[in-house]
């Protein structure tokens, strides 16, 4: 759609890569390898027609044109997505006013609402044709976004061909993640089953259930009454499901799983970005955001190009960014504190809490948008990164504060009968009758399953509603047009493709999709010690998620302008941060929240069959308390003597717990580091390919061969 | 010395970078900035004549010749070092036999002793000339390697110009390191002075000195006799010098210092490698090592170039590497164990230990050479990296095992009077009368000062001896030559430059220099809690070291072939590893070896003036022991009751110690991470320069400007 010479000029300018030679190497796939080495059929495979060929490529240079593959046919030499890029580049550069004031390009015009939209067209929905001549969009529709494809590999090459690298990388990542969830959820389920067996044979559980009236427990709150420890028999057993030796193993496993997952994603990402020719994609000097140029208070010489450009002082931006971060952190802590205070006063249950969380996150996102805009970042990438970071901090605090509270703080500062600690006059909340871990597991299940259900339903319904709304909005205009058309004696014509596409929704970017996945990743790693089933739920959710997202992109969104990317950007360091947090959190969860350490201690110092363990964990209330209230002594969880002082066992246990934390952390981080070092970031075969490509490019483009 | 066209061909082949435009920016220097902003004169500056100009550069292309600076004068367009590179490239590629068997290049010929040496010539020692026309070597001699330059900046640009980037980077690194030692040693000395003051006012120290016969201590070994605690008054005070609150602060400081040092070295390195045009230096496909080609058992098609090449199976190499590492680790542990056993049996003192260490390291290096050769690495870089790693592991275990033993194991498993633990029938060694920390400090001082003295003397003397030996060896031949010369009626001619240079020593590479510095870095960071004066000693040593090394390179070595490098290679990850170790080690040192925690505990639970602290730390021997031996009870260090059981205080302290470790580690690692994130790896101005360079290269080399 642009003249050949213009195409060539811009292709060189934005360093497009063009093919030198065909390679026929499918995407390497470990599951395929595994199955074929076991000579099993691969149920994940499917034959997708018209796979885009893979090439050795090098940067385009006009004067070397004849050395490139396919240069005879000028109509097909550049791919559609490449033409889009060139066209977008031209549109983005065209000045429409004073260049010095940054009045350049289509983006600015759109942001100032001169135009309402600019988007490339979808391929037309062709009439049914034989398989081999299907259009790309039809292929994607048929072999990717349909529900029946749930157990197939995604046709990544096709996705990239149609939507560009950025979107393809998202789907590659979520597919990769889902694949890795498979072993995790398998082992998680196994651990759960082992837990079931352990519960059946556990002696303390039997002791609890058969204790009858032996253990009269002190009331859990000021207005409660005393209760019988044997009454929580079932809860105790349920707690054991999540709190046994298997969980310790699973925490270690999941921590290492997370590290390995990230390592291998790096490799896959490197392989993909090389396959898609964006591995040495360097940002061409990015243009300033249109909003930035519109609002920048002054201009300055750009030290790189020497041109006059809108400018915002670095120092002021830094100050604003710091202020922005402050506001975010204060906001997050405040909201968190409020909701916690509510929880402590037991105003809301898990479900209500979830609704509050979902509501708050909407408010948060708006605030983050405003703040990030105010910080005046020059380029779109920088803007997006800061925005993502802000929202992530928000959401992290928002979603994780309540599990963190339950896991590490609830019930720790209760005091003991007769000397309860109070906060603002209210007695500190203790964990429920079953202990803190079971409460944490409950909370997690509600948040994970609830959130995912709500999100999926929302994702399923909201596009339908939105597109119905959009169609309705446009109806009057269409009618007008139809009337006009009738006037002009054209009969009932179909909608032109740009009008049909205009009715579709604006593509909102991948931010929400990524955020959802990353938060999920956090839940299944940070709190895995509390719920070995979490990976299974995540797996099921992701199977649905992938197809939902695919449908959105193929049928419900306008076709987005192709964006290049060589990795998932700022999300990767965020994932690394979560992995780190996970190790810490698991160490402390096992050491302090679970009953692993006291059981171990009892087993080795008292009785290897754990007989009498229940009695060991329960302290007797101080005499004065007993006299004051019921004249009978009652029991409570803790290691204290009859005066309320800590027993020596308490300190022994404390030392063991702390040692456990130190050993666990050092061990896991050390093994993680080892994995990091041993696994090369770029797969060997990809490295070989890159070298081969460099070599071939050099051969093809060599200009002078001196003979001497 | 090669024809112009050949030069051009190879320049393009090995992608030499050539100048586009002069920049006049001196190396950024924080100390200069600081002094000039305080408007103080800078005593570190010196005017070095003929500074090599700095350029914006881009890759050489013959057909764009006229766009480069200085392209008129074909004699000076390529610099001497660049010519060396080209010549070496030609020599290294020339086949002399069967190409398939790898019989290619000068390296192989030298390794098979067909030639004895190949080296570029030094510049001739000119007669005295005015300053501005001094040769590079003379400048270096006068403005760098002289002792009088000890307080000056090094003329890095000149060094790079004459010796190439790899050697210049070493000197840049050691200079940078020495500069950073300055604040560390300053604060270390301050802490030491504070220690002196604290000792004078310390109440427990006074109690010890004035205790008279109050504390009769149990004998420290089976044949020793009981002793009086007041007799160690001075040792106790000396121990306090290294064991007070200031040391805790200094450990934190040094841990963060190390992290920050590495971060800023990254920046300086990036700035230098950009200034010297090797920042995007990608290894041109490295040639196999000559030894490799000679010994490889088979040939295979190189998948990159398609040429037949000597080959060694990857799997076999991996197996050999693993075996090699095993051998190393077993060797290291064994030797370590032997020397430790010797120590435990008190056979050797610190000095003897040092001599054993120095001897063992010679043996080790030979072994590492043999093993690495056996592993058959293909390229020189890989070979060197593996060799460095091996020797480093050796030396690390070798040098650090004895301080580690003293710091963390000695005196921990002694047991108590009447129930001493034994190993092989020998009672476990206790720390000396003054405690473990003072012993560690002693050991460190001996190793650091002793090792550095021996090394420096060795470095000073051994080249002289060696070059005297070399001259003597060559004398007969020279005489012969002289006789011949006389025969041919030439009168007493001077030595030709290649003969004069042949008499010099072969440059041994930078391995030993780096190793020495890195081990020193380890001592001053890992054990800093035991000796705040260590950085000061390191600083003094390095001042001497730099000039010694400079003299070696300028006057005693043959001129090495220019090697490019963009950083200090594998040494950087090794430094990072040491920094990590340092944090762990300091955490445990302060928590368990120093008396910081018990003093803190006593201060807050018993008496804030520490009165009675000495009595608190000493346990009374069990009654049966007293009866058995002397009929009077004696005291020993520990928190036990009269039966030898641990007191509750012991467990309280243990919990506090462990918590301290956890808090210290998390805090320091967190702050380290923060520094890592906040400080950008490439300084902003360098980034700007790189962008500007890219932009200019694009402008200069653009081939077609389509007008439309």
Image (spheres, coloured by chain):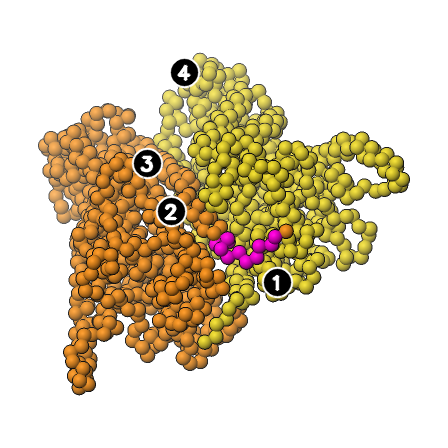
Chain colours: A yellow, B orange
**Residue receiving disc 4:** A624
**Residue receiving disc 2:** B267
- Have a look at marks 1 and 4 and say if they share a chain: yes
Q: Is residue B699 found inside the magenta-colored segment of the image?
A: yes
**Residue receiving disc 1:** A65
Mark 3 surroundings within 10 Å by alpha-carbon count, few (fewer than 14), some (14 through 19), many (20 or more): many
Q: Secondary structure at mark 3?
A: helix
Mark positioned earlier in the residue sequence (3 or 2): 2
Mark positioned earlier in the residue sequence (1 or 4): 1
Q: Is residue A327 found inside the magenta-colored segment of the image?
A: no
- The subunit carrying tag 3 is B
Mark 2 surroundings within 10 Å by alpha-carbon count, few (fewer than 14), some (14 through 19), many (20 or more): some
- Rounded to the nearest whole Å, what is the CA distance between mark 1 and mark 3? 71 Å
Residue B613 position in % (x across, y down): 21, 30
**Residue receiving disc 3:** B657
Residue B410 position in % (x across, y down): 25, 46
Where are the magenta residues, as a range? B697-707
Marks 1 and 3: CB-CB under 8 Å? no
Q: Is residue B340 visible?
A: no
Q: Secondary structure at mark 1?
A: helix
Mark 1 surroundings within 10 Å by alpha-carbon count, few (fewer than 14), some (14 through 19), many (20 or more): some
Seen in the picture, residue A500 relative to B393 is either above or below; the reply is above
Marks 1 and 2: CB-CB under 8 Å? no
> Which residue occupies 82% across, 32% down?
A480
- Rounded to the nearest whole Å, what is the CA distance between mark 4 and mark 2? 67 Å
């Amino acid at each position: 759609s642009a003249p050949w010479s213009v195409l060539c000029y811009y292709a060189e300018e934005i360093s497009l890569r063009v093919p030198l030679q065909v390679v026929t190497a499918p995407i390497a796939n470990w599951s395929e390898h595994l199955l074929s080495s076991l000579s099993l059929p691969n149920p994940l495979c499917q034959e997708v027609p018209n796979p885009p060929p893979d090439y050795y490529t090098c940067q385009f240079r006009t004067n070397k044109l004849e050395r490139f593959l396919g240069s005879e046919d000028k109509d097909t030499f550049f791919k559609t997505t490449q033409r889009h890029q060139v066209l977008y580049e031209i549109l983005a550069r065209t000045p429409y006013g004073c260049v010095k004031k940054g009045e350049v390009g289509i983006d600015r015009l759109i942001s100032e609402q001169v135009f309402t939209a600019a988007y490339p067209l979808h391929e037309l929905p062709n009439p049914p044709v034989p398989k081999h001549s299907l259009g790309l969009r039809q292929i994607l529709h048929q072999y990717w976004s349909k529900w029946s494809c749930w157990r197939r590999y995604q046709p990544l090459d096709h996705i990239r061909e149609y939507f560009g690298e950025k979107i393809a990388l998202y789907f590659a990542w979520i597919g990769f993640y889902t694949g890795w969830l498979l072993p995790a959820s398998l082992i998680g389920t196994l651990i759960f089953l082992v837990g079931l067996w352990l519960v059946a044979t556990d002696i303390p559980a039997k002791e609890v259930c058969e204790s009858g009236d032996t253990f009269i427990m002190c009331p859990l709150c000021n207005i409660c009454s005393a209760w019988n420890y044997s009454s929580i028999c079932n809860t105790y057993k349920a707690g054991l499901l999540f709190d046994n030796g298997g969980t310790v193993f699973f925490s270690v496993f999941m921590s290492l799983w997370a590290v390995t997952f990230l390592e291998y994603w790096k490799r896959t990402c490197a392989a993909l970005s090389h396959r898609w020719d964006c591995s040495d994609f360097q940002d061409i000097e990015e243009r300033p955001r249109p909003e930035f140029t519109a609002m920048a208070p002054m201009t300055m010489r750009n030290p790189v190009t020497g041109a006059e450009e809108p400018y915002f002082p670095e120092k002021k931006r830094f100050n604003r960014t710091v202020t922005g971060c402050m506001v975010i952190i204060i906001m997050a802590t405040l909201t968190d504190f409020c909701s916690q205070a509510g929880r402590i006063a037991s105003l809301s249950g898990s479900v209500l809490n979830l609704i509050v969380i979902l509501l708050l996150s909407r408010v948060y996102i708006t605030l983050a948008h405003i703040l990030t805009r105010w910080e005046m970042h020059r380029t779109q990438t920088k803007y997006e990164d800061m925005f993502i970071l802000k929202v992530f901090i928000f959401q992290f605090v928002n979603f994780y504060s309540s599990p963190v509270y339950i896991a590490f703080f609830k019930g720790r500062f209760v005091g003991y009968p007769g000397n309860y600690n109070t906060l603002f006059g209210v007695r500190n909340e203790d964990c429920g009758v079953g202990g803190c871990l079971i409460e944490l597991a409950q909370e997690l299940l509600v948040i994970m399953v609830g959130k995912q259900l709500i999100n999926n339903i929302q994702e399923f319904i909201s596009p339908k509603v939105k597109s119905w709304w959009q169609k309705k909005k446009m109806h009057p205009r269409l009618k007008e047009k139809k009337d006009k058309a009738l006037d002009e004696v054209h009969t009932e014509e179909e909608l032109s493709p740009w009008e049909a596409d205009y009715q579709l929704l604006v593509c909102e970017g991948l931010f929400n999709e990524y955020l959802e996945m990353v938060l999920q990743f956090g839940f299944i790693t940070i709190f895995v010690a509390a719920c070995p089933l979490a990976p299974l739920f995540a797996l099921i959710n992701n199977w649905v998620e992938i197809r939902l997202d695919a449908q959105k992109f193929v049928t419900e969104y306008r076709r987005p302008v192709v964006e290049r990317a060589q990795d998932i950007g700022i999300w990767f360091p965020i994932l690394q941060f979560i992995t780190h947090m996970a190790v810490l959190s698991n160490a402390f969860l096992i050491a302090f929240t679970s009953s692993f350490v006291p059981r171990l201690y009892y087993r080795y110092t008292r009785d290897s069959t754990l007989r009498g363990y229940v009695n060991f964990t329960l302290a007797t209330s101080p005499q004065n308390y007993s006299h004051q209230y019921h004249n009978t002594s009652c029991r409570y969880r803790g290691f204290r003597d009859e005066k309320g002082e800590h027993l020596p066992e308490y300190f022994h246990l404390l030392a063991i717990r702390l040692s456990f934390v130190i050993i666990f952390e050092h061990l896991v981080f050390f093994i993680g580091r080892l994995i990091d070092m041993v696994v090369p970031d770029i797969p060997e075969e990809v490295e070989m390919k890159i070298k081969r490509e460099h070599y071939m490019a050099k051969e093809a483009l060599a200009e002078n061969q001196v003979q001497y």
